[in-house]
Amino acid sequence: MSVRVVARLRPLLAQELEKDIIVRTDSVEPDKPPTIIKIPNPRNEAEEFSFTFNGVYGSETTQETLFTAEVAPHIKSLFQGLDVTIFAYGVTGTGKTHTMRGGMKLAERGVIPRLLSGIFRRGKKIMKETDGETTVDVALSYYEIYNDKVYDLMEPPEKRTPTGLPLRAEANGKTVVVGLTERACEDLKDFEKLYIEANNNRVTAATKLNAHSSRSHAILRVKLTQTTGNMVRESTASAIDLAGSEDNRRTDNGKERMVESAAINKSLFVLSQCIDAISQGAKRIPYRESKMTRILSLGQNNGITVMILNLSPLRNYHLDTLSSLNVSSRAKRIEVREIENEVVFKQVPRTNSAQAAQRQPLKPLA
Ligand code: ADP
Ligand code: MG
């Protein structure tokens, strides 16, 4: 099992009036690609925190660049039978949905449509190369976890059972969602139709509960089946747009939002513990402690996990950004910030010590 944790800093948006950028990228050496995110210490702005990742993508990074670097290489592994899991983690408004789903324009498409496109392309190639002896089938499931309950997004919201779908442990140790719809998918057009429909279900369901879809985890599961004679090879790719990691205790919210927050915090906490444990090669991965990590059997099978931490550059996200960095980064350092302004030496007239004492700056209140 391998895991990569990478950070993506989004650009300032046209409509953003606040332009106080406090997050920046850095590299270990001038010519190396960035691997460091820097942010001021909110308690002492003379200090800066540095967080190290396996990869860092600055605000100019295109959808294509991110996909090519972090997702495309794993499509081959998926066809070799490995499970591939891609998470987008971060505060609401930092670009998780942009990263995973993206926009409608071709260049703006996110990880998910590009992944599907790559899978279909490779599948077709294999069928052609084997003269149809190997068949490749793709089936989609799409569900969300809201308040620790699992809901099928391929079903219209009025068909939902309030208790959600049950989980069942299989003999092979994997956990399955009982009764989850699986739709066969022939090509990208098929996929897009299903995906749009399911995303609409997600928004409608959230609205009914007077909630927001950013308060649930959305999980797209792509099941790949390759059949040659009586040999079957099955693997899955999961693409997850996680619920916002912001701390809702900071904003005055009602009881319902608090229940949501508790469920989100717990699952995100378990997720980060699993990622840590996997990356340290630990024997025990605490994946059973949340539904999301259980369903993904995180760390229980041979596979590849990529966590993308989405970040906003702005000061008004400061505390939430810091806590998401703390949860997801592999290493943190504190350093005194370099002085950015040129130091100018002024000639100071000589004074006696009494005058000098008067010039002592006022001490800030403790
Ligand atoms: P989240 O899903 O984390 O709440 P969104 O993906 O909805 O955040 O992003 C918030 C806003 O920022 C959206 O308007 C989105 O289009 C824009 N955005 C996010 N990342 C980028 C990016 N890399 N380039 C351009 N716009 C972006
Ligand atoms: Mg979103």
Image: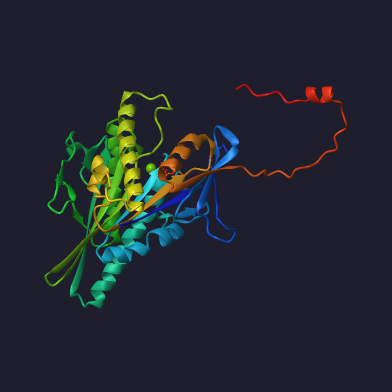
Q: Quadrant of the C terminus?
A: top right
| Residue in view at x 43 percent, y 48 percent | 330
Q: Is residue 102 left or right of residue 298?
A: right
| Count of marks, rendered view | 0
**Which residue shows up at 39% across the image and 30% down it?**
248
The single residue placed furthest to the front in the displayed view is 353
Q: Which is more toward the observer, 218 or 174?
A: 174
The N terminus - image quarter: bottom left
Place of residue 92 in the rendered image (x, y in percent of width and height, measured from the top left)? 41, 39
Q: Position of residue 285 (x, y in %)?
A: 28, 47
The residue shown at (47%, 44%) is 311
Residue 151 location, quadrant: top left
Q: Nearer the viewer, residue 38 or 220?
A: 38
Quadrant of the image occupied by residue 114: bottom left
Residue depicted at 56% across the width and 36% down the height: 18
Position of residue 155 measured from the top left corner of the image (x, y, whole percent): 20, 44
> Where is residue 289 drawn, in percent x and y?
25, 40
Q: Nearer the viewer, residue 126 or 4?
A: 4
Depicted 42 relative to depicted 254: above or below: below
Task: State whether residue 250 is above or below residue 60.
Answer: above
Horizontal arrangement in the rendering, residue 27 relative to residue 243 (left or right): right
Is residue 298 rendered to the left or right of residue 323?
left
**Any part of residue 153 in sight:** no
Q: Is residue 151 visible?
A: yes
Q: Would you place residue 135 above or below residue 250 in this image?
A: below
Image-quarter location of ligand 2? top left
User: According to the image, what is the colour scheme of the structure?
Assistant: rainbow
Answer left or right for 340 relative to 56: right
